[in-house]
Amino acid sequence: MDNRVVVAEDEPITRMDICEMLTGAGYSVVGQVPNGLEAIEVCRRLRPNLVIMDIKMPMLDGIEASQILVKENVADSIIILTAYSGREFINKVKEIGVMGYIVKPIDEVRLIPQVEIAIAKGKEIRSIKKNLNTIKITCTAKEILMERYRITENEAYRKLRKMSMDRQLTILDMSINIIDNTKK
């Protein structure tokens, strides 16, 4: 199952309860950490689909840790968990780019739907980013071919497609080869 979750919560009983709810619902809890620093380390190593992050934690709070995770793109999505429902916290969290916000006390009825939506949206965003990266690489290869052979964009695409078929490579792999060979 591709539903790997990291739980970052400094209260051991709350962390244990969340993990039990998640595993009971079929999720794989791949990391349980008591602070934001450890959450970052675990996410860098495991690249989970979801991080459930408490706001108030020692060493590095959940907001700062979430900003780093989003910037480094090492987790597909983040849900903030907090005892605070004040507007100032909600506004801070909205700016970060997290997928959800759950106010404690937490129960399975409120947790699981948030988790489902956050994981689905995270996977959707990851797929979009992957497609954009592929398009960017292909466009760069076409530009190289256009300049090298003084041809139009359509001609460059046809040439790229023919080169990839002749070498039995995907267009993406052929594009990467063209870019790499240009750098040499």
Image: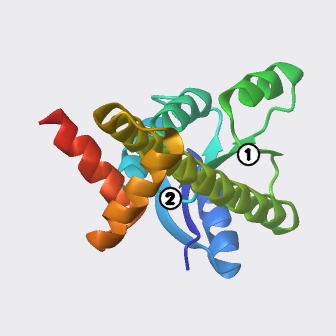
Q: Nearer the viewer, residue 87 or 3?
A: 3
Query: Dot 1: within a 10 Å radius of its alpha carbon, few (fewer than 14), some, or many (20 or more) residues?
Result: many
Mark yes or no: residue 146 visible: yes
Q: Position of residue 129 (x, y in %)?
A: 56, 47
* Image-quadrant location for residue 181: top left
Callout 2 touching callout 1 (CB < 8 Å)? no
Q: Amino acid at mark 2?
A: Pro
Q: Quadrant of the C terminus?
A: top left
Q: Quadrant of the N terminus?
A: bottom right
State the SS at label 1.
Answer: loop
Give the residue number, with chain letter if any, for mark 1. Answer: 99
Please tell me which residue is depicted at 47% across the width and 48% down the height of the picture.
155
Give the residue number, with chain letter if any, for mark 2. Answer: 48
Please tell me which residue is depicted at 50% across the width and 58% down the height of the picture.
48
Q: Residue furthest top?
A: 88
Q: Amino acid at mark 1?
A: Met
